Amino acid sequence: MDAELRFLDHPTRHLFFTGKGGVGKTSLSTATALRLADAGRRVLLVSTDAASNLDEMLGIALRNAPVPVPGAPGLSVLNIDPDVAAETYRQRVIAQMAASTEAERATVREQLSGACTTEIAAFDEFSSLLAGGAAAYDHVVFDTAPTGHTLRLLSLPQAWSGFLKDNDRGASCLGPHSGLKMQEARFNAALAALCAPALTTVVLVARPDRSALAEAGRSAEELRALGLHNQQLAVNGVFRATDPHDGVARAIEALGQQALEAMPDALCALPRSTVPLRAFDTVGLPALRALLSDAPVPVPPSAVSAASAAASPPLAVAPIDQLVDELAAAGRGLIMVMGKGGVGKTTIAAALALGLVQRGHAVHLSTTDPAAHLAMTLDGEVPGLQLGRIDPKLETQRYIDKVMAARSPGLDAAERALLLEDLQSPCTEEVAVFHAFSRTVAEARSAFVVLDTAPTGHSLLLMDATGAYHRQMTREFEGKASVHVVTPLMRLQDAAYTRIVLVTLPEVTPVSQAAALQDDLRRAHIEPYAWVVNKSILAAGTHDPLLQARLEGERRQMARLAGGLAQRTFAVPWLAQAPVGLAGLAGVLAAGKA
């Protein structure tokens, strides 16, 4: 089946690729940028995802400045690294305060050390690119973070423009308001560029999957509300069975077709592009060029031979129900489900929670994901299972009310107005979400809390905030023997209190990102408890030529895990029934059991 690429018919200057994690945003955005460069255009590919794997795809080291891509004349790539961006931003703001006193500069340094400054700095670079900072290029292609985080990013130009309008008092994580007129003009220019159909196209990427299409539909409506009306839909990974006798292949095709036929009305009217499921991993320039090629890509003969399939070793991993038994033995605790977007974290978190309830435990199942799908995944009520969500808007208002109540009594009317004005800044949300996360972590002292986290990049920012708070508390109470401080980070480091479950697909990019996340956690002295390999075709059994070709890649990834990457490995086979609702989740728990 050939690719149908309507978003490349008349490409605008800015192309945003967004969607649910795991749908192929990075692959499609990179392949698009490469195709435009091959056509003689000057192209800048920008990643706004803190957990981007562009370096692995392109085989180059990424920086916060454009890096030419060897083998692709005209193509450069830039990764907005949050930590580097934050330090650059801090230095620039302080440099603008040369005429200020040292005390004033020290105050601003403290304000710029907060967790939200990381997000603001990345956003500032993003705005600069939209407002003319990439004038040397014909096209700027944005590979964005998963939907929830991206919607916040795209809403920030409007939010900060409104916050700064006629506001020349006080200070925030942007720096002193009185010195921000340059940023205000930049944010307004970024907002204008985003909302101009002749300049910007948003490509909503989905797979032929119910949840991915539902999220794309919600995103389409929210983006229209922000003024971004030039939208297109790209359906990636469309599968057509070639072996009519292969039940697994027929079921995969049927589920995809059903999802497309029932997709939300918000998507039906959009121009649609279709990219077929490919037999190869999209790593390296040849594979990326082939992804959008109309020419058929041959399946390696070794992958389809019956002998190869028959010689495959059995999958040496345990079923997920066994993981539930191990977790239940503790009697209580925090179970954090983490991983790259689109690997099935929400499904695994819901299945683990249901399994614990079935074993007689009370469970609070919650999420930190801005694009939460827990309610849709469960699709029903279970006695003993409390469903929650850390809602950013609700938590922000709760945080503002708490701060105002604590500090207002000692302030006059003008000071209270200034405090409330500062608390209306968009960065307050990041602080509020961290406080809600801390409360949820503390609940696991007496019960089970299963936490479905946001995709890797956003979760790492939350972990950064947790580390920053820990350092602040330990400094504050250092030397005070009478004070016993237990921070959220200390609870996450306690293996008897917290079990981290990393979820991945048996593909090179999700496994590599889970491995990188594991390294990040270990640097924070947090040891993952187990890995779950989701949607394993190897465990399901299939003879379809295309799926057999993909099995070769799956075997390589399973070998990586068996080679010491994971201490404990559990697997969920690809299931013909979508893992939605109580019956579907029960099927996940039953899968692979003897």
Image (cartoon, rainbow, N blue to C red):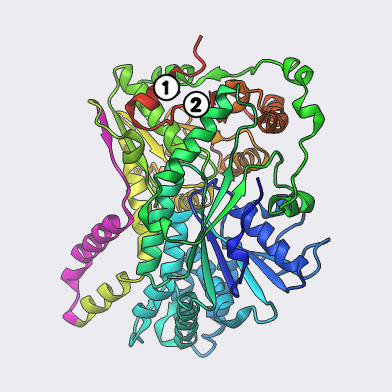
The relative height of residue 459 versus residue 126 in the rendered view (above or below) is above
Q: Which residue sits at x=78%, y=17%?
A: 307
Give the residues drawn in magenta, as a range: 384-413
Provide the major secondary structure of the magenta segment.
Answer: helix
Residue highlighted by disc 1: 587
Nearest the eye: 430 or 578: 578
Q: Position of residue 177 (x, y in %)?
A: 40, 82
Contact between marks 1 and 2 (CB within 8 A): the answer is yes
Q: Secondary structure at mark 1?
A: helix
Q: Is residue 35 above or below residue 563?
A: below
- Outermost right residue: 71
Lower sequence index among marks 1 and 2 = 2
Left/right of residue 326 with respect to residue 69 in the rendered view: left
How would you rate the neighbour count of disc 2 (Cα within 10 Å): few for under 14, some for 14-19, many for 20 or more?
many
Task: Give yes or no for residue 392 being in the magenta stretch.
Answer: yes
> Mark 2 highlights which residue?
575
Q: Residue at x 56, y 39 (%)?
A: 525
Give the image location of residue 191, x and y in percent. 45, 78
Looking at the picture, tell me which residue is in the foreground, 134 or 220.
220
Q: Can you tell which mark lies on residue 133? A: none
Q: Secondary structure at mark 2?
A: loop
Mark 1 and mark 2: Cα distance apart in space: 8 Å
Residue 358 lies in quadrant:
top left
Q: Residues within 10 Å of mark 1 (few under 14, many from 20)?
A: some
Observer-nearest residue: 330 or 413?
330
Toward the bottom, the furthest residue is 99
* Amino acid of disc 2: Leu
Residue 29 lies, with reference to residue 423, above or below; the image says above
Q: Mark yes or no: residue 46 visible.
A: yes
User: Could you tell me the amino acid type at mark 1?
Assistant: Gly
Q: Residue at x 41, y 39 (%)?
A: 452
x and y percent of residue 329 in the render? 40, 17
